[in-house]
Amino acid sequence: FASPTARRAQVGATSEAPRGAEGPAAQAVRRYFEAWNRRDMQTACEQFSDDCQYEDTQYADAFVGKAALEAHLNKVADALPPTFQFCIDDVADGGEVVGVQWHVENNGEAL
């Protein structure tokens, strides 16, 4: 989703309000990406409801439920080098809803 000129920010960092001032959805998004980057998929999945439907545009069908989501995330993480990281570019905080723009990097290079 990101262009080569996208503003970079480390996951967990914010250029706007302090983290405590963010709504619950924005906080959950940050926790998700932080956990993913540590390859802590259990914590990543804790950010979703038990009956979640996770859509990954690389796959035809949604992953339904936390068990399916965790299996999917582990499979994806296992296929990528440990230097692969998600980087948040921008968070549109709507309290209970959130939009996020992100990009991925490998060895610090935007992909």
Image (spheres, helix red, strand yellow):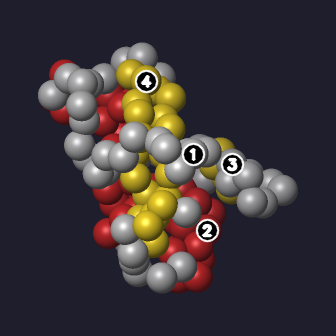
Q: Nearer the viewer, mark 4 or mark 1?
A: 1
Is 79 positioned to the left or the right of 84 in the image? right
The span from disc 4 to disc 1 (Cα, nearest Å) is 18 Å
Total labels: the figure holds 4
Instruction: Looking at the image, tell me whether mark 1 or mark 3 is earlier in sequence order.
Output: 1
Instruction: Looking at the image, tell me whether mark 3 or mark 4 is earlier in sequence order.
Output: 3
Q: Nearer the viewer, mark 3 or mark 4?
A: 4
Asked if the residue under mark 4 is in contact with the one under mark 2, i.e. CB atoms within 8 Å, the reply is no
Instruction: Looking at the image, tell me whether mark 3 or mark 2 is earlier in sequence order.
Output: 3
Determine the secondary structure under disc 1.
Answer: loop
Q: Nearer the viewer, residue 60 or 110?
A: 110
Instruction: Looking at the image, tell me whether mark 2 or mark 4 is earlier in sequence order.
Output: 2
Q: Position of residue 50 (x, y in %)?
A: 52, 47
Is 61 positioned to the left or the right of 97 in the image? right
Q: Nearer the viewer, residue 104 or 37?
A: 104
Q: Which residue is mark 3?
A: 55
- Mark identifier at residue 92: 4
Q: Amino acid at mark 4?
A: Ala
The span from disc 1 to disc 3 (Cα, nearest Å) is 22 Å
Q: Nearer the viewer, mark 2 or mark 4?
A: 4
Q: Position of residue 96 (x, y in %)?
A: 42, 21
The residue drawn where x is 50% and y is 38% is 101
Q: Nearer the viewer, residue 43 or 90?
A: 90
The residue drawn where x is 47% and y is 42% is 6
- Mark identifier at residue 72: 2
Q: Which residue is mark 1?
A: 3
Q: Amino acid at mark 3?
A: Glu
Q: Amino acid at mark 2?
A: His
> 10 Å neighbourhood of mark 1: few (<14), some, or many (≥20)?
few
The span from disc 3 to disc 2 (Cα, nearest Å) is 11 Å
- Furthest toward the front, the residue is 5
